[in-house]
Amino acid sequence: MVKSAAKRLLVVEDDRSIADLLKFHFSREGFTVTTTPNGEEALILIEEVKPDLVILDWMVEETSGIEVCRRLRRKPETATLPIIMLTAKGEEEHRVRGLEIGADDYVVKPFSPRELVARATALLRRSHPNLIAETLKYGSMEMDMAAHRVTRDGSPVYLGPTEYRLLRHFLRNPERVFSRQQLLDAVWTHNEDVELRTVDVHIRRLRSALNEPDPIRTVRSEGYSLDTNRAG
């Protein structure tokens, strides 16, 4: 189990490539991501999805991001909803205006997705500390992400960086079967030159580090999963 609630993110961005990029990076970090290019639709989705955080582009279809932010701050139920403004406008007056309207943070394009994830996580930690999982636990395995430490049955498990990310992905999605391609997309930052068989190599290393009983289930013609009946 994950010792936190799921983190819901709404991305309001009319550039499809940027929206997809944000969805990819935030999904990897355990967020449930909803996207829309439309400010009016964003206001509806906020009521339906009830996001924990909104990333809001300054200029979107129908209703501008700045107007969406203004309306959210006027409503008691969304007055404290964490909002990060995202825009190509880097001038000081735009940053000041966005913050004065009520945005909690301001990121200028082009940006680093990793930095944006870090900013969002820091903002959530301040506003909703219980949402940020510090520990992932499944069966006898436990991952302390703050200390970057893994144990099984209380004994330390020593993992390389890739095996750590692989296990983290499995722990966030126990019992779900992932194909090799899905694991490449989720765990490897740049996977264009990585062969599918590389996944098998790291799965073997992960299995070796975790020892018996083997918690990784091989699903023929499908991929791998962290199996509740084999987590030990």
Image (cartoon, rainbow, N blue to C red):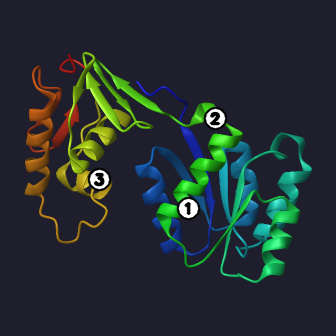
Is residue 23 visible to the viewer in this orientation of the structure?
yes
Q: CA distance from mark 1 to mark 2?
A: 18 Å
Q: Does 173 sit left or right of 107 as displayed?
A: left
Q: Does 81 sit left or right of 156 as displayed?
A: right
Looking at the image, is mark 3 or mark 2 earlier in the sequence? 2
Residue at 10% from the left image edge and 41% from the top image edge: 205
Circle 2 — which element? helix
Question: Pointer 3: what residue?
Answer: 187
Circle 3 — which element? helix
Q: Quadrant of the N terminus?
A: top left
Residue at 9% from the left image edge and 21% from the top image edge: 212
Sort mark 3 into few (<14), some (14-19) or many (20+) by Cα contacts within 10 Å.
many
Sort mark 1 into few (<14), some (14-19) or many (20+) by Cα contacts within 10 Å.
some
Q: Are marks 3 and 2 in contact (CB under 8 Å)?
A: no
Q: Nearer the viewer, residue 117 or 53?
A: 117
**What amino acid type is highlighted by mark number 2?**
Pro
Task: Give the quadrant of residue 195.
Answer: bottom left
Give the answer, above or below, for where 140 lies relative to 103.
Answer: above
Question: Pointer 1: what residue?
Answer: 116
Question: Pointer 2: what residue?
Answer: 129
